[in-house]
Structures are given as structure tokens and as C-alpha cells.
Amino acid sequence: MNAVPETLLIVWATPLYVLVIGAEILLSHWQHRNLYSWRGVFQNLYLTLLNGSLDLLLRGLYVGLLVWVYQRRLGQLTNPWAYWTALLLLEDFVFYWLHRFDHFCRVLWAVHVTHHSSEEFNLTTGFRSSVFQPVYRFLYFIPLALLGFRPEDILVMYSATQIWGILVHTQYVGKLGFLEWFLVTPSHHRVHHASNLQYLDRNMGMFLIVWDRLFGTFAEEDPAEPVRYGLTTNITDHSPVNLVFHEWKKLADDLRKPGPLTQKLKYLFAPPGWSHDGSSLTAAQMRQQQALVDSQ
């Protein structure tokens, strides 16, 4: 079983993206669903171009590091089917934790929030990239190289699962029966992009939903609780700079508040919403508060 070059995956996927996005735009227009806006599409394109440019700029550095680690690998699977199956499972597993930390660490959320700041949810939302994620994403791939997976194969597998991760950004596909139990489906990912309290910080997987089921971050899409897309407090300034840096500005304001070093470290590394004085709450704190109200 030979590795498919990452560039060939991109070449193959591009016409697929054009086809399905074009079809979704036409359906949305004909059915008057207004799932797309020009502003949203251009924002998504702008953010993916920034992300891709930074990734290309840093690629030589992080691939070199992965090669260095791979040369010191602990071992390697020789059976090609076992090799690629293990790589799929482990790459998806490390992505789950990358994505989970993006949601539960404030400084990483400042990077990732751009992907969630749109109040629209359509196939182009999959391209609404976290601009600075290439700066640290490769760190999660180091254990894979150490376990004996070739760096080029790691990148191919990430790109392959990312194709699926883009295609689940749609409102046109309902629940998919038994596939809902182990795959990330459009229904699961709609939940992930919701700002409803019961859906916050749920369904972190890229390809497999089993990690969310195992580690307590799974939530089912509930017809009685329609999804509201975007942030708990949506941005009003959609300028190119603010799209990328609005959460960094809020973080800087919080770091300037008087207090000890431990307070500043919590503003950096505690979950989004943490505050020293209770003026804002994390998703977990809001759920606890709501549970108390519901129990009365």
C-alpha cells in the first residue's frame, strides 16, 4: 500500500469542493434558505489563505523536526494494513486532543475562535481556518513520528481526514443512522459549531466521534434545541484584522487587570470565560449555574 502524495490529495479534493459548494449555494438560493453571504464566503477564503500561507512558511521547520524524531523512532509497523489503520486511529486521536485543548485553553482559543466566529454554517465554513494553528499543530504529530510513522504519511493522513472534516460543515445532511455511532457526521458537527449552552465545547473529533463518546465531550443534536451558530457573544466588527485578533485583544485586556501572576496565568491557560471576579463564566460554570436554576 503506497502513500498518496499530499499534493495529489489536494488536486483531487479541489474539484470535489467546487462541485459540492456550488451545489449547496444553488440549493440555498433556490430554497431561499440564505445559508451563504458574500461577506462570509470572502472571510472564509481570506482566513484559509492566511492559514495556508503560514503553514507553507513553517513547513520546512516542522517537517525537519518530524524527520529528526522519526529517525529516532521506537519501532515501526511493517504490515501496511496495520500501519495505515493505526495511523488513521492515532492521527485522529491526537487531533481530538489538539482540538480539545483549543477549546479549553484561553490562549489557544484565541487562535481557534476565528473558525467559530461565523453565524453562518455552510461548506465554506470548513475553510474558515485558525490562522496561527500551524505554529503549534505539528507538536501533536511528534508522538506519531516517534512511534514510527513517516512524516509524509502523517501529513497525508491529516489532509485526508481534513477533507471529511470540511465536508461535514453542512445543514443539508440529516442524521446518518448507524454511522452516527462512530463517525463525525454533519449532525455532530452542527452541534460543535453551536453557541447554545448545552452544545458548547462538544464533539471535538475530526473523523471519528468515538473519542468524544469515550472522554465525555459528546452531545447529540436535539430537534427541540435548534442550533444557533456563532459565539456566545458574536463579533460586530468584521474587519480583516479584527477577525483574527479580536480574542487576543480581550485577552490582553484581561492580562492588564491588577492581580498576582497566578491570576494572569489562569487568564492565559484556563478555559475561555474564566475570570478572577466572576464577571464572566466558563461553559462548565454556566452549566452548573443552569443546573442549580433547573433544580429549584
Image: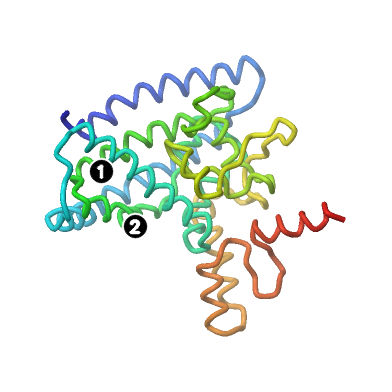
Q: Residue at x 28, y 40 (%)?
A: 86
Looking at the image, which is closer to me, 270 or 57?
270
Please identify the quarter of the rendering in which residue 170 is found. top right
Q: Are marks 2 and 1 in contact (CB under 8 Å)?
A: no
Q: How far is mark 2 from mark 1, CA to CA?
A: 17 Å
Mark earlier in primary sequence (2, 1): 2
Residue 265, above or below 124 = below
Q: Quadrant of the N terminus?
A: top left
Q: Quadrant of the C terminus?
A: bottom right
Q: Position of residue 221 (x, y in %)?
A: 64, 34
**Label number found at residue 154:** 1
Query: Of all residues shown, which one is farthest toward the top?
Result: 30
Q: Position of residue 249 (x, y in %)?
A: 55, 64
Q: Position of residue 97 (x, y in %)?
A: 43, 52
Secondary structure at numbered mark 1 = helix
Looking at the image, which is closer to me, 251 or 168?
168
Residue 217, above or below 42 = below
